[in-house]
Image: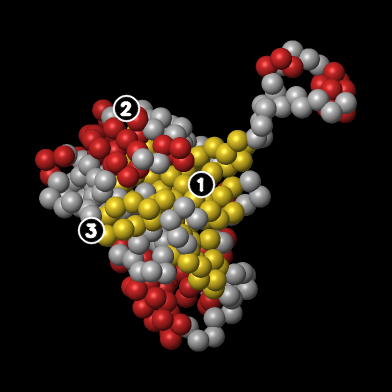
């Protein structure tokens, strides 16, 4: 499995797995079937909203982890908006169905702008976005990156730098938090995302809601267009953008045609996608 694996078709199923942090964003139908035994590697699940194409695979994840061959003692952390009553109803159904789960499920309420440490040097920040009249959570992973050597010491030999460090001189620039992945399925208002420039500027990878590849096809105010996504990506200096949650009205040939002409910092994905360049 690559560092980034995702599946997304608008209205059908969406999820994205960040392997380095063992974190799954959303869990649309079919996710456990794709993971098979690697489903035991998932440590954290961050849910964006309670629509079935983003939540429907959670039942399968729990069932697979509980009854397949593997380490079924590992705890599973599920982060969700407790204020949404549909989540609570879904979890009540799971609790009634699975009465003897061999692992602990930690159901954790996450609020807008909460931060969750997921690895030693990575954290997830929750950013609220509009999904039409609904509200959804989007999530950005920030990685704490070690500061580079200060320019004035760049030409020194290692032993010279060592002596300076030993004498108490700070030869490195301060560590900084760098946005490495932003997941915003589903979202409808580009201004929401642009407003988070301080959290997102320069993010390496954006998983974007690009339901409508042609702006003239937009017949649903709860999702964004490809043109809007491209404008946001350029405004926020994103490194690479995966345009997904694509409507089923567009066939594979149409998607292929767009990818043949689109700028290199974008790719349109309808279905599965993997990439090993985003750690």
Image side of residue 31 versus residue 213, left or right: right
Identity of the residue drawn at 27% across and 54% down: 131
Q: Are marks 3 and 1 in contact (CB under 8 Å)?
A: no
**Distance in Å between CA atoms under marks 2 and 1:** 25 Å
Q: Vertically, is 193 above or below 60?
A: above
- Where residue 256 sits, quadrant-wise, is top left
| Secondary structure beneath label 1 | strand
Identity of the residue drawn at 28% across and 29% down: 262
Front position among marks 3 and 2: 3
Which mark is first along the chain, 2 or 3?
3
Tell me the quadrant of the picture where the C terminus can be found. top right
Front position among marks 3 and 1: 3
The front one of 73 and 162 is: 162
* Residue at image mark 1: 141
Residue 145 in picture, x, y percent from top left = 62, 36
Front position among marks 2 and 1: 1
Which mark is first along the chain, 1 or 2?
1
Q: Vertically, is 179 above or below 99?
A: above
Q: Residues within 10 Å of mark 3 (few under 14, many from 20)?
A: few
* Residue at image mark 3: 133
Q: Residues within 10 Å of mark 1 (few under 14, many from 20)?
A: many
Q: Residues within 10 Å of mark 2 (few under 14, many from 20)?
A: few
* Residue at image mark 2: 263
Q: Are marks 3 and 2 in contact (CB under 8 Å)?
A: no
Residue 147 in picture, x, y percent from top left = 66, 31
Identity of the residue drawn at 36% across and 40% down: 195
- Tag on residue 42? none
**Distance in Å between CA atoms under marks 3 and 2:** 32 Å
Identity of the residue drawn at 39% across and 33% down: 236
Q: Are marks 2 and 1 in contact (CB under 8 Å)?
A: no
Q: Is residue 207 visible?
A: yes
């Amino acid at each position: 499995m690559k560092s980034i694996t995702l599946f997304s078709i608008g209205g059908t199923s969406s999820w994205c797995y960040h392997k380095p942090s063992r974190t799954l964003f959303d869990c649309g139908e079919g996710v456990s079937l794709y993971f098979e035994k690697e489903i035991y590697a998932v440590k954290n699940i961050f849910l964006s909203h309670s629509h079935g194409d983003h939540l429907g695979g959670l039942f399968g994840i729990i069932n697979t982890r509980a009854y397949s061959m593997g380490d079924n003692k590992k705890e599973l952390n599920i982060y969700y908006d407790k204020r949404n009553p549909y989540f609570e109803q879904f979890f009540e159904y799971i609790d009634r169905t699975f009465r003897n789960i061999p692992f602990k499920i930690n159901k954790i309420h996450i609020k807008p702008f909460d931060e969750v440490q997921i690895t030693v040097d990575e954290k997830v920040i929750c950013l609220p976005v509009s999904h039409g009249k609904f509200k959804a959570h989007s999530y950005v992973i920030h990685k704490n990156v070690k500061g580079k050597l200060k320019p004035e010491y760049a030409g020194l030999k290692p032993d010279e730098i060592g002596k300076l460090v030993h004498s108490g001189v700070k030869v490195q620039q301060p560590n900084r938090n760098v946005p490495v992945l932003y997941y915003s399925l589903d979202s409808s208002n580009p201004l929401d995302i642009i407003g988070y420039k301080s959290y997102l500027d320069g993010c390496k990878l954006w998983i974007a809601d690009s339901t409508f590849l042609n702006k003239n096809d937009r017949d649903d105010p709860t999702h964004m267009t490809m043109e809007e996504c491209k404008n946001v990506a350029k405004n926020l200096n994103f490194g690479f953008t995966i345009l997904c949650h694509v409507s089923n009205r567009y066939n594979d040939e149409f998607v292929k045609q767009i990818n043949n002409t689109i700028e290199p910092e974008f790719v349109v994905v309808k279905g599965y996608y993997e990439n090993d360049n985003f750690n």
